[in-house]
Each structure stands twice: as structure tokens, then as C-alpha cells.
Image: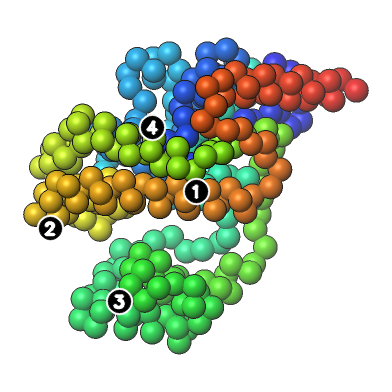
Amino acid sequence: MPSPAHPPAILLMGPTASGKTAVAAQLATTLPCEIISVDSALVYKGMDIGTAKPDAELLKRAPHHLIDIIEPHESYSAARFRDDALALMREITERGNIPLLVGGTMLYFKALVEGLNDLPEADSTVRLIIETMAEEEGWPAVHEKLRKVDPETAARLEPNDAQRIQRALEIYYLAGRSMTDLLKKPKYVYFPYTPIRIALLPEDRAALHERIAQRFDAMLEAGLVDELRGLRETYGLDPELPSMRCVGYRQAWDFLENRISRAELREQGIAATRQLAKRQLTWLRGMDDFTGFDCLADNVSDLVLEYVRRELEAQIMAGET
């Protein structure tokens, strides 16, 4: 590949169960691409079944960066992803290859291309203070505290949205300014690549829902509950950890705590996964300048490959003129 001022980068996005991994594998084994995972769950070691992590055979054929990089008791952020991804993209380009970013964590894609606002890092002491408030008074009361200092953010959040209420109040305590004010500051954006944006979208939403149900059933059959049981024994996990809030693991945790039955685990897991897909599609609808393909088409991998080849050739031609 040539080395223009802004080399190409392929961004392959889509909701869960849209077949992104299969399409990415074909691109990576046909073109000089290296895959970077854009998935907030695949970063965790040991969480293989519930994240639909590519198996060893596929990873050998099409290696993925940013998979299995932290343990389930640790945290990962959009800011850290951006730093990690940009460093990898530079190395991949220097090797003469094309970065192929693949996943469904739309916040990570947005952070990578558009940059991040200057918000304070998480502080465990402040979070503990807020959690203690919630234990004593309830999250609706904490939500009311947030409303007094940041009414715009509070208006967007449900009174029991613990994770987001905690973060917004934490930002106020650390910065002395509301998250609303800080988000209005201009962002510094560094993305020296020419993106080829691709989205895998279902023309038939019901068919995607059926695929989600089949995949969750396969996860249960493969031992999702036993996987979580082992992770809890190994790491001493807490249900409020980011890793344990992942779809599937959250429901499996409730099952292990005897709060729901096996049938309810399946029902709630499928429903939560469908809600995740709905949120991902909402994110995509808010984006522009991407080319969409029906993820349910039998030849979707071939169609995407043909499109990417055309786009790369166009960039090469443009660089020569």
C-alpha cells in the first residue's frame, strides 16, 4: 500500500449478531488488513462464551488486536481505547497494512473519529462516597442531588440509572463544573486517516431478532453459566463491575444468585441482547457518511469486499493525481 498523508482505515460497524466477525475475517484474509476489535466486552480475559469471542482457529487465521487485554475485575474506557487504537493504527500503517476496526461499541468509534471531551478520570474515593449515598438514600435521591447541580444531564437520566448518575455527579465533584458545561468545550480531534465507513444493517429486524435468540441459546448450551461461575471463583467479582454489566453475564449472575429461573435467564438474556442491538442501531442512525449493507444477505462478505476494493483503488488514484 502507498503511504499518503492520510492513509486508509476501514471502520466496520453493526449491531450484535450482524455477522461482523465473518465479514472482517474475509477482508483480513484477502486484503493487507489487520483487525482491531472495537468491543468493550472482548477486552476481558476469560469472558469468551458470553461475548461471542472469535475462537482460536479464527484468531489464528485472522488475528485481532485489543482482545483479552485486561482481567474481568479491571476497567476499560473510551479514552483508553482511543489511545490504544491510534497507537495500533500507526504501527499497522507503518507495516504497510490497513487498520480494520471492527465492532459494535459505537461510543468507541465515535471517540476514535471525533475525539473526546476533557472529562476527569474516574476516582474510586468519590465513587465510594456516591455509592454510600445511594445505599443510605436510594438512587432517586442521588438523582435529585444531580438535578440541583446539573439539571440538563439529570433530565436525560432515569432516577435509577445508577451508572450514569454516578458518573455525572462524580464529574461535578471532581471538576467543580457540571458535565453539561464540560461537554460544551471544544474537543481536540486527531484522526490522521481516510476512513472507509461500513455498516452491517438488517433489512428485516425480526430476522436479526431470531438470529440473536439462536446465538444466545448457543451460548447457554456452550456453558455461559459455568463460565461465569468459574470467573466468580477466580476473580471474586462484584455484580456492579463493568464486565459483569455486560449483556448475558448480568442475567447469568442473577440466575446463579437464584433470583431468576433458567427459563427467565434465557428470556431476559435474549430481551437484553435485542435491546442492545436496538441501541446500536440508534447510534448508527445518528451517524452519517457510511455505506450500509444488509447483514442478512448470503453474499454480504463478498459485497463488502468488492466495495472496499473500489474505495481503496479510488484513494490510490486520488493520491496519484
At x 45% / y 18%, what residue is drawn?
62
Residue topped by disc 1: 280
From the viewer's perspective, is the residue at label 3 or at label 1 nearer? 1
In this rendering, the label closer to the viewer, 4 or 1: 1
Q: Amino acid at mark 4?
A: Ile
- In 3D space, how far apart are the residues under numbered discs 2 and 4 (Cα atoms)? 31 Å
Residue 139, numbered label: 3
Which comes before the other along the chain, label 2 or label 3? Answer: 3
Q: Residue furthest right?
A: 321
State the separation of the CA atoms marked 2 and 1.
28 Å
Residue 228: percent from left, percent from top: 18, 41
Name which of mark 2 and mark 1 comes first in the sequence: 2
Q: Position of residue 180 (x, y in %)?
A: 56, 73
Q: Are marks 4 and 3 in contact (CB under 8 Å)?
A: no
Q: Position of residue 18 (x, y in %)?
A: 47, 34
**Amino acid type, callout 3:** Trp
Callout 4–callout 1 Cβ contact below 8 Å: no
Sequence-first disc among 3 and 1 = 3
Which mark, residue 259? 2
**Residue at image mark 4:** 67
* Sequence-first tag of 4 and 1: 4
| Mark 4 to mark 1 CA distance (whole Å) | 20 Å
62 relative to 101 in the view: left or right = left
- Could you say which is closer to the camera, residue 44 or residue 216? 216
> For mark 1, does the 10 Å Cα neighbourhood hold few (<14), some (14 to 19), or many (20 or more) residues?
some
